[in-house]
């Protein structure tokens, strides 16, 4: 469920919001910051594919040595759909139809990448020169962060309760890290509530793909 990254292993570290198949937007953003694949690191808050048009390219990022990701709810839907049953319809209804139009080697390749997704952590902790960051898709469902602590994985990838409360003016810090970075819920702009930063800005709906530098 957890993975640690030592920031001192990299020159710069960036975190990107939900990509959802917007591969070109991601490459354009990386070009804008002159991203150096030999010394920089990109960390994704999850939801690499679905709804956009360049889904296979986004899944292939999993094999890039300069890329890390936590598992989002759309990755979970893909994992569940490979098992079959009603999960297939759920994924299709939420943007997964692209997968079922693939054929031959390409479909096999993406199936293998979806199996890799099962090994993605739900939470990534990054120690940087400016403090400790915790990355998860939707939420860290506890008021105190502890590396390795048992938390509900479904809430990590699906929960919107904390954000909904914050949008109503009710927010409080999560102890145990300097800042928490989440995606999952499209917002008009990156939004900070106490020490929780939400960076899904709806790139797949024609908005900006948010990329932030944490080191």
Image (cartoon, rainbow, N blue to C red):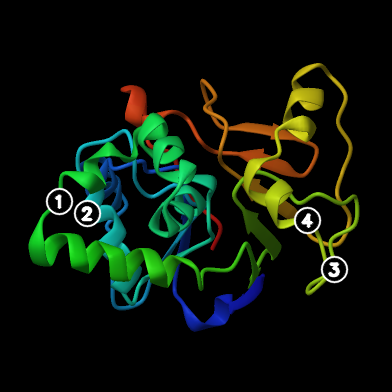
**Which numbered disc, 4 or 1, marks the residue closer to the eye?**
1
Specify whether residue 204 is in view: yes
The picture quadrant where one finds residue 97 is top left
Which of the two discs, 1 and 3, labels the residue nearer the N terminus?
1
The answer to the question of whether label 1 and label 2 lie on touching residues, with beta carbons closer than 8 A, is: yes
Marks 3 and 2, how far apart at CA: 35 Å
Q: Nearer the viewer, mark 1 or mark 3?
A: 1
Who is closer to the viewer here, 116 or 194? 116
**Cβ–Cβ under 8 Å for marks 3 and 2:** no
Q: Is residue 33 left or right of residue 185?
A: left
Q: Nearer the viewer, mark 1 or mark 2?
A: 1
SS assignment at label 3: loop
Q: Which mark is residue 152?
A: 4
Q: Secondary structure at mark 1?
A: loop
Q: Position of residue 3 (x, y in %)?
A: 63, 75
Q: CA distance from mark 4 to mark 3?
A: 14 Å
Assess whether mark 3 and mark 1 are in contact (beta carbons under 8 angstroms).
Answer: no
Quick one: label 4, few (<14), some, or many (20+) residues within 10 Å? Answer: few
Q: Which residue is mark 2?
A: 56
Q: In which quadrant of the rendered view does residue 4 lie?
A: bottom right
Q: Which mark is residue 138?
A: none
Cα distance between the residues tagged 2 and 4: 29 Å
Residue 92 locus on image (x, y percent):
35, 36
Residue drawn 32% across and 67% down? 113
Task: Kindly give the residue lying farthest to the front in the view shown.
Answer: 85
* Nearer the camera: disc 4 or disc 3: 4
Pointer 1 residue:
102
Q: Quadrant of the C terminus?
A: bottom right
Q: Please tell me how crowded label 3 is: few (under 14), some (14-19), or many (20+) other residues with Cα within 10 Å.
A: few
* Residue under pointer 3: 146
């Amino acid at each position: 469920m957890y993975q640690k990254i030592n920031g001192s292993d990299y020159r710069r570290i960036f975190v990107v919001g939900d990509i959802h198949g917007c591969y070109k937007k991601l490459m354009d953003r990386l070009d804008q910051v002159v991203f150096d694949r030999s010394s920089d690191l990109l960390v994704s808050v999850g939801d690499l594919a679905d709804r956009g048009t360049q889904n296979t390219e986004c899944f292939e990022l999993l094999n890039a040595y300069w890329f890390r990701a936590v598992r989002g709810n759309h990755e979970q839907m893909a994992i569940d759909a490979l098992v079959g049953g009603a999960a297939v319809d759920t994924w299709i209804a939420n943007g997964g139809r692209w997968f079922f139009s693939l054929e031959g080697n390409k479909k096999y390749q993406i199936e293998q990448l979806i199996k890799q997704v099962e090994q993605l952590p739900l939470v990534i902790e990054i120690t940087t020169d400016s403090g400790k960051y915790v990355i998860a898709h939707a939420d860290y469902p506890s008021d105190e962060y502890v590396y390795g602590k048992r938390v509900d994985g479904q809430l990590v990838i699906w929960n919107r309760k904390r954000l909904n409360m914050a949008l109503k003016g009710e927010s409080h810090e999560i102890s145990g890290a300097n800042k928490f970075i989440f995606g999952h819920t499209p917002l008009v702009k990156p939004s900070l509530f106490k020490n929780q930063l939400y960076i899904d800005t709806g790139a797949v709906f024609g908005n900006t793909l948010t990329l932030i530098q944490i080191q």
